[in-house]
Amino acid sequence: MTWLFYLAKQYALPVVAPLVDYVEAQGLSFGFYVSAKVNRVLPQAWRCHPVFTDLASARAFGADFVLSPGNFVDFRLPGVKVELFHGIGIEKPVHYQIRHFFDLYLTSGPAVTHRFQSLKEKYGYFDVIETGWPKIDYIKRFDGRDLRRRHSIPEGKRVVLYAPTHSRRMQSAEALLPVLPSTIRDDEIWLCKPHELTDRSLLAALSALGSDRFRIVNEPDITPYLHLANVMVSDTSSVLYEFMVLDKPVVTYRTLDRRDKGIDIQRPDQLRAAVDRCLAAPSEMADQRARHLREVNPRLDGNIAKTVFEALAAIDPKAPLGPRRKPMNLFRKGQLLYHSRYKKGYLR
C-alpha cells in the first residue's frame, strides 16, 4: 500500500509527524503533496521521500490512501480520502461539518466518535474509526529539555500561555485585551499565540502590547510553548485539550461547553484571580481534566500512529466504505478548484 500526506497548512506538520515516523520505521511507501507555504518549512529529513507540489505529480503517485489533517482534500487524487483533523475542536459545530470530501474519519475519542457515527448513518458513504488524534503522540514525546534557555525565559519566571481562537462568537481577545497589561505580574512571562485567522486589527492590538513580559508567538507549532507554560488561558479553542494532555491547568473565558475542564470566567476582571488559583494549586482540577480526556482523546500512550496504520491496513482501498455513493458535491468541488487556481497558499 502507498500513502500520501496532503499538507495545505503549516500547522499540519506536527499532526502528521508521528505518522511519518511510523511509516518510515515500517519501511512503507509514502510521499507528500504540499502547498508552497508548507514546502518552505517541510523538514529536511522528510525530503528523502517524494514531495509533490503539483496535482499531476501527486496523482501519478497513485496512493492507496490520502491523509489530510484539514477540512478538505482534493477530490481529483486517487485513493481513500482520510480525515485526520487539524485539532480537537469538539465544542465547535464546524468540527462535525461534512463537506463530502472524505471517505473515512479517524476520530479522537468516544465523544467525537458518537457524533460521527450518527453522521455516518445519515450519509451512508463513509466510515468512522476511533484511533486517537495523531498530534497527541507528538506532544507526549516532545523533547522539552532546555526550552527556557532556547526561548530566553529566565528561571524563576512563571509562564502563562494565552491562546485565543479566532471565531468572533468564541474568541476572548477582544474582551481580555484591556485587562492584560494590568494582569501580567513582574515574575511572569505571558506568551500569546493567536490563531492564524485572527482579525488583523485585533492581532495588531495584541502585538502592540508586546514587551519582555508579553511576547507574541509567530511559529506555527505551539507544542514547545505547551511544555514551557505553567497555565493556559483560552476560550473555546481546541488547543486547550492539547495542553490538558500534559496535565496542566487551564483558564477559559466563557467557553461554550465542558466548563469544568478548567476555571471558566465570565468577566475579564476575574482573569488574575483565576490564574493565581491555577498557579497555587495546579492539580486542583486534575480529575476533571482526566475525565474529559477520557471522552475526548483517551489514548495517551504514544501509540496513536500505530493504531492509525493498523486500522488503515485492514481496509481494502478499492472497496466502498459505505452502502451509498458519495454525493456529487459540485459546489464545494468548484470552490476547491477556484481556490487552488486563484488563492495563494492552496495546493495546486
Image: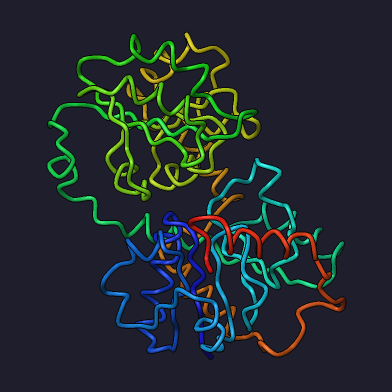
Residue 189: % across, % down: 25, 26
| Residue 242, above or below 163 | below
Image quadrant assignment for residue 143? bottom left
Q: Quadrant of residue 15?
A: bottom left
- The x, y position of residue 178, in whole percent, is 43, 11
User: At 43% across and 54% down in the image, what residue appears?
Assistant: 11
Q: Nearer the viewer, residue 88 or 290?
A: 88
Question: Looking at the image, which residue sits at the far front?
Answer: 342
Name the residue rendered at 54%, 30% in the picture: 235
Q: Vertically, is 235 above or below 343?
A: above
Across and down, in percent, residue 74 comes to 62, 70
**In the image, residue 49 above or below residue 255:** below
Count up the numbered dots.
0
For residue 123, what is the image quadrant? bottom right
Q: Residue at x 54, y 12 (%)?
A: 267
Is the image coloured rainbow, by chain, by secondary structure, or in one colour? rainbow
